[in-house]
C-alpha cells in the first residue's frame, strides 16, 4: 500500500461536495445561447456559516486551480488520475484557515471549480448524456459570466443571499469583478489580487500562442482525443509559454537544477537542452499534463480572451460599469514586476473605481517572485486582507 504523503494543514482533511442543478425544462443557458440540461459544480467550504448567513466569502480560483483551496484532500470523485499528489494540499492553504487572511473562525469560505473545469464540475471531460462519451469539443463555450452565474446558483443552494466578500487572484480576480458588476447587491467587499478589468494585448498574444500549441499537436484531433493519446506535447508547450509569465526570471533561475536533464524521448530532437533553466521549464510543462485536461485549458483560455465587462454590461466606459458597485468596497493588489497582469491593469481598475466614486484601496506588493507571489507569500497580503474584511 502506498504510504500517504506527509501534509499538514490547520484545517485538516476536507472533502469536495457536489451541487447539480437544471433539467430539460429549466436548462442552464450559457452566454452564447448554448444549453445544458444539467450542470454539476464541485465545491468545498471551510468554516461555519453564521446564523444570520452574513459571513460568507466566495473565492474564485486562477487558470489551473480547483475548488480545493485549503486543507488536505487526497481524492475527488470522478476526477481519477488528474488528481495528482501536487493537488492534495489546497492551493491557498496559507491564506485560508484559523487566524489567516481568510479567517475560518470568522468567515464561511466557499470555492468552486469553474463550469468547464476538469476537477469535478461539468466540463469537456464529463460524460455527454447523448453519447455516453466525454463531451470533448462539444462542451459549450464558457465565459466568465457563465462561471459567475453558475456559482450564484450555488450560493442560492447554500442559502446565501449576500456575500460578505468575493475574492480572487489572477483570472479569479476577473471573475470576482464580474460577480461584483453582475450581482452588485449580493456582495459588500471585492478583493482582486494581481488581476484587472480588461484583457491586455500582451495577454491576448500569449494566450493565442498557447491555443496554437495545443491545437497543432497531432494528437489533438479537434478535441476528440479521449480514448486515445492526448495532446500532451501541445499542452506541455502551452504551459511552458504561460509559466514564464507566472514566475519571475530570478525565481526561475533559483528553482532550476544545476545539471541539464536530457529526456530519453528527446534523443531524436535536433536541439538538445543546454542550460538548467531549459530543463526546469520543460519539466514544468510535462508535469502539468499529468494533472490537467487540454480541452479544459482551451475553454478557460477562451473565456479569458472573451472577457469584456463593457460588452456584458452594455456600457461605454468602465466608470459607468463600476458605478453599479457604489455600495461596495474594493481592495486591489499590484505585484511589482508582474509579467502576467502588469501594474498598468490595476491602475486602470483603480482609476475607474475613483471616477465611479467607489471606495477602494490599492496596495503594491514588493516581491521578487513575480505573479505567483499571491500563492506563495501570505505574509505580504494577510494584514491588508484581514483588516479590509473586518472593516467591511
Image (spheres, rainbow, N blue to C red):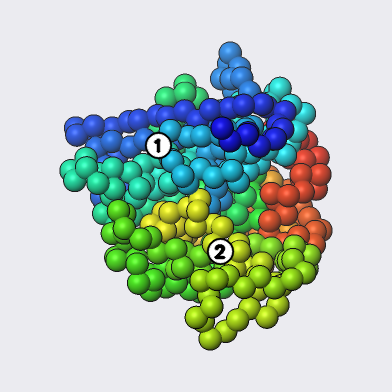
Q: Earlier in the sequence, mark 2 or mark 1?
A: 1
Pick the front one: 121 or 291: 291
- In the image, what residue occupies the spot 25% across and 46% down? 133
Label of residue 334 in the image: none
Q: Could you say which quadrant of the image residue 369 lies in?
A: bottom right
Mark 2 Cα-neighbour bin, 10 Å: few <14, some 14–19, many ≥20: many
Name the residue tied to disc 2.
285
Mark 1 Cα-neighbour bin, 10 Å: few <14, some 14–19, many ≥20: some
- Say what secondary structure mark 1 lies in: loop
What whole-number distance in Å separates the C-alpha atoms at marks 2 and 1? 24 Å
Query: Is 331 positioned to the left or the right of 234 in the image?
Result: right
User: Decide: marks 2, 1 in contact (CB < 8 A)?
Assistant: no
Residue 207 visible, this orientation: no
- In the image, what residue occupies the spot 61% across and 19% down? 48
Residue 200 drawn at (x, y percent): 55, 68
Label of residue 78 in the image: 1
Furthest-top residue in this view: 51
248 versus 268 height, above or below: above
Query: Is 216 positioned to the left or the right of 45 in the image?
Result: left
Residue 135 drawn at (x, y percent): 28, 49
65 versus 370 height, above or below: above
- In the image, what residue occupies the spot 60% across and 62% down? 284
Residue 151 drawn at (x, y percent): 45, 37
Q: Quadrant of the N terminus?
A: top right
- In the image, what residue occupies the spot 76% across and 52% down? 363
Amino acid at each position: 500500500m502506498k504510504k500517504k504523503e506527509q501534509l499538514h494543514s490547520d484545517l485538516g482533511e476536507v472533502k469536495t461536495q457536489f451541487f447539480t442543478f437544471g433539467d430539460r425544462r429549466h436548462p442552464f443557458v450559457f452566454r452564447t445561447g448554448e444549453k445544458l440540461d444539467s450542470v454539476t459544480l464541485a465545491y468545498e467550504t471551510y468554516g461555519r456559516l453564521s446564523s444570520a448567513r452574513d459571513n460568507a466569502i466566495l473565492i474564485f480560483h486562477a487558470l489551473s486551480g480547483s475548488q480545493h483551496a485549503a486543507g488536505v484532500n487526497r481524492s475527488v470523485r470522478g476526477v481519477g488520475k488528474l488528481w495528482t499528489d501536487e493537488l492534495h494540499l489546497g492551493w491557498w492553504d496559507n491564506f485560508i484557515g484559523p487566524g489567516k487572511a481568510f479567517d475560518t473562525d470568522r468567515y464561511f469560505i466557499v470555492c468552486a471549480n469553474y463550469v468547464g473545469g476538469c476537477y469535478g464540475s461539468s466540463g469537456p471531460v464529463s460524460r455527454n448524456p447523448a453519447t455516453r462519451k466525454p463531451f470533448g469539443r462539444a462542451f459549450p463555450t464558457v465565459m466568465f459570466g457563465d462561471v459567475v452565474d453558475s456559482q450564484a446558483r450555488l450560493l442560492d443552494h447554500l442559502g446565501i443571499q449576500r456575500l460578505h466578500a468575493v475574492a480572487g487572484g489572477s483570472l479569479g480576480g476577473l471573475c470576482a469583478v464580474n460577480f461584483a458588476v453582475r450581482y452588485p447587491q449580493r456582495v459588500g467587499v471585492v478583493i482582486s489580487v494581481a488581476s484587472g478589468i480588461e484583457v491586455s494585448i500582451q495577454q491576448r498574444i500569449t494566450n493565442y500562442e498557447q491555443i496554437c500549441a495545443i491545437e497543432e499537436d497531432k494528437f489533438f484531433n479537434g478535441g476528440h482525443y479521449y480514448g486515445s493519446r492526448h495532446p500532451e506535447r501541445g499542452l506541455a508547450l502551452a504551459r511552458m509559454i504561460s509559466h514564464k509569465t507566472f514566475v519571475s526570471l530570478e525565481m526561475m533561475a533559483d528553482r532550476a537544477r544545476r545539471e541539464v536533464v536530457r529526456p530519453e524521448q528527446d534523443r531524436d530532437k535536433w536541439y538538445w537542452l543546454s542550460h538548467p533553466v531549459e530543463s526546469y521549464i520543460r519539466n514544468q510543462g510535462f508535469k502539468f499534463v499529468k494533472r490537467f485536461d487540454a480541452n479544459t485549458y482551451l475553454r478557460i483560455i477562451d473565456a479569458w480572451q472573451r472577457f469584456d465587462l463593457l460588452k456584458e454590461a452594455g456600457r461605454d466606459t468602465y466608470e459607468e460599469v463600476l458605478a453599479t458597485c457604489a455600495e461596495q468596497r474594493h481592495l486591489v493588489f499590484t505585484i511589482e514586476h508582474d509579467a502576467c497582469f502588469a501594474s498598468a491593469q490595476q491602475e486602470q481598475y483603480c482609476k475607474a473605481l475613483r471616477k465611479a466614486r467607489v471606495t477602494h484601496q490599492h496596495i503594491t506588493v514588493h516581491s521578487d517572485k513575480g505573479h505567483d507571489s499571491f500563492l506563495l507569500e501570505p505574509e505580504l497580503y494577510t494584514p491588508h486582507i484581514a483588516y479590509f474584511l473586518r472593516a467591511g
